[in-house]
Image (tube, rainbow, N blue to C red):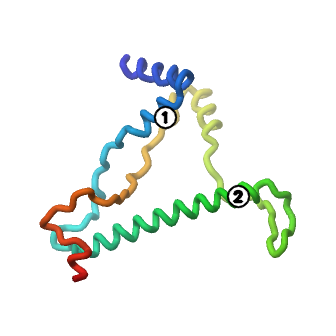
Amino acid sequence: MRGLIGTVADAVRSVIDPATLVEQLATETPAPAADPADTYTEADMPPVADIERAALSLDLANDNARRADRAKRAARKVLDRLPAGTYGNWIVERVTSSRTTVDLDAVRAAYKKHGLGPVPMKPNGPSLKVRRAEIVPADIATLTEVAV
């Protein structure tokens, strides 16, 4: 019953004050996922300097990917509205994609028609996130100390 009340409350809130619901969902911390089965053993663990270098590299790559995504969105705003044609040294055209995806609306309709209940879903795999530690434990050598 509590779940139903929470769902109804969220639905009402999404109509009355949607920003509050979005803020609430954004502040909820996801539960940590279990480590994969193939994590390093104590004997195979790489040096801390290598781990720091890899984490920094991933962090920088993520920043560059976000910048690239923003640049792509800005370029698409202009290009998506152009009719197909040649513009200077560039040809703008639209081609059909060979990629296909499941039509969830059709699947839901088929499940409903045959009384199969909700469409079974599975969660996505865990995401690897890297963020800089606020306090570095004293017993861990930092990349600066290793370089010296």
Q: Which label sits on residue 120?
A: none
Q: Which of the pair 122/95 is nearer the observer?
A: 95
Quadrant (top left, top right, bottom left, bottom right) of the C terminus: bottom left
Image height of 15 relative to 87, above or below: above
Q: For the residue marked with disc 1, what is the amino acid?
A: Val
Which image quadrant is residue 44 in? Answer: bottom left
Specify few, some or many for label 2: CA neighbours under 10 Å numbering under 14, 14-19, or 20 or more.
Answer: few
Real-space Cα separation, disc 1 to disc 2, in angstroms: 27 Å
Q: Residue furthest bottom?
A: 148
Q: Which of the pair 131/30 is nearer the observer?
A: 131
Residue at x-position 31% and y-position 60%: 132
Asked if the residues shown at circle 1 and circle 2 are in contact, with their CB atoms under 8 angstroms apart, the answer is no
Q: From the top left corner, tell me how far across and down residue 73 is, in percent.
A: 65, 56
Label 2 sits on a secondary structure element that is helix
Residue at x-position 34% and y-position 58%: 131
Which image quadrant is residue 108 in? Answer: top right
Q: From the top left corner, tell me how far across and down residue 13 is, in percent.
A: 50, 23
Residue highlighted by disc 1: 22
Image height of 15 relative to 25, above or below: above
Residue highlighted by disc 2: 76
Q: From the top left corner, tell me how far across and down residue 23 is, in percent.
A: 45, 35
Residue at x-position 42% and y-position 18%: 5
**How many marks on residues?**
2
Q: For the residue marked with disc 2, what is the amino acid?
A: Arg
Residue at x-position 46% and y-position 20%: 9
Q: Is residue 115 left or right of residue 39?
A: right
Q: Which of the pair 125/20 is nearer the observer?
A: 20
Q: From the top left corner, tell me how far across and down residue 95 is, in percent.
A: 77, 61
Label 1 sits on a secondary structure element that is helix
